[in-house]
Amino acid sequence: MTQTSLTIWTNAKLPDEAARMLAENIAPHRLIYAAETNPLNLASSQVDANLEQADIAFGQPNAEQAMRLDKLQWIHLTTAGYTAYDRDDFKAALRARGARLTNSSAVYDEPCAQHVLAMMMAFARRLPESLQTQLGDRAWPWAQRRRESFLLNGQTALIFGFGAIAIRLCELLAPFEMNLIGVRRGVKGDEPVKIITDEQIAEFLPQADHIINILPGNDSTTRYFDADKFQRMKPGALFYNLGRGSTVDQEALLAALESGRLAAAYLDVMTPEPLPPDHPLWSAPNCFITPHSAGGQNGEMRDLVMRFLENLRRFTGGEELRNRIV
């Protein structure tokens, strides 16, 4: 594709370093900003008149508006998730005009995978309990703490939503010699671990020590983890959610924690967000919450710009785009 100058729209409110990097490296293309920029990738997007001028959108354009703009030929999202755009009508509209949609999953696979690993190690080594002791009575329960600690070696982890984050997590977990099993709709055959489909879940759920949820949010995954699935889990299993809060029936999760069927839950995503201070998940037994921070790291915005610039080079050079969805 040989294009001399394209108009690139963004509604991302970037820190100074990242904004300079973007502005200095897009020549000969023109950069325009939305009337209202947003520092939060996860915030909903408003209709913006400036988007109508754009050939390329970098950020989070309003989905209803973007699907109607014939001039808009490529959307690069500043998130790994794409719930607002995961619709048949939106994808069909882009395909009809030959437009493309990419996300930033390559920016988030490493921090999210490390976040899951940190959660797994923290519980195995009983770090939350030791912190509570330090902040509480400062007792010295060394025998109990040693007895309750365990190793990840040989345990089974069932990973739902087997994409870039799951692949990187499997690489990080490889030294522990765990039994890693991925769950996805279709088996490609090139996955690094055993893959099962949804039809096999009833067989494998009772075997898993760790159930890791990285599912995207869409109509097919709403409340995917319901009371029946929690009931099928092995007593004492650990549940992790880094996908979307909408994929979990939170009332059923609370019941599983309060009954003791689940040993613990580590949650980075909830419904709603922010989680209200009086929400029962805050005080549920062995429920540990991080504020949708799994994908974060101090170079996040710089890396988002670098990935976009790499794909921009590919787009103008007629090469295949990375992290392509449509």
Image: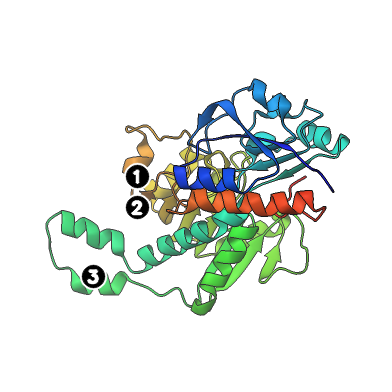
- The earlier-in-sequence mark between 3 and 2 is 3
Q: How was this image coloured?
A: rainbow
| Quadrant of the image occupied by residue 45 | top right
Q: Is residue 209 above or below residue 1?
A: below
Task: Evaluate whether residue 92 shows in this view.
Answer: yes
Q: Where residue 98 appears, x then y in whole percent?
A: 86, 40
Judge by depth and name the residue closer to the eye, 18 or 154: 18
Residue placed under numbered mark 2 in the picture: 286
Residue 185 shown left or right of residue 125 in the figure: right
Q: Where residue 78 appears, x then y in whole percent?
A: 59, 43
Residue placed under numbered mark 1 in the picture: 284
- Circle 3 sits in a helix, a strand or a loop, which is it? helix
Are the residues at dot 2 and dot 1 in contact (C-beta closer than 8 Å)? Answer: yes
Are the residues at dot 3 and dot 2 in contact (C-beta closer than 8 Å)? Answer: no
- Circle 2 sits in a helix, a strand or a loop, which is it? loop
| Quadrant of the image occupied by residue 221 | top right
Q: Is residue 36 above or below residue 195?
A: above
**Residue at image coords 34%, 52%:** 286
Residue 182 shown left or right of residue 230 in the figure: right
3D distance between C-alphas at marks 3 and 2: 17 Å
- Circle 1 sits in a helix, a strand or a loop, which is it? loop
3D distance between C-alphas at marks 3 and 1: 22 Å
Crowding at label 2, few (<14), some or many (≥20) Cα neighbours within 10 Å? many
- The earlier-in-sequence mark between 3 and 1 is 3
Q: Where residue 184 appears, x then y in whole percent?
A: 70, 56
**Residue at image coords 52%, 45%:** 20
**Residue at image coords 53%, 39%:** 41
Amino acid type of the residue that numbered disc 3 sits on in the rendered structure: Gln
**Residue at image coords 33%, 69%:** 125
Are the residues at dot 3 and dot 1 in contact (C-beta closer than 8 Å)? Answer: no
Q: Is residue 139 above or below residue 284?
A: below
Residue placed under numbered mark 3 in the picture: 144
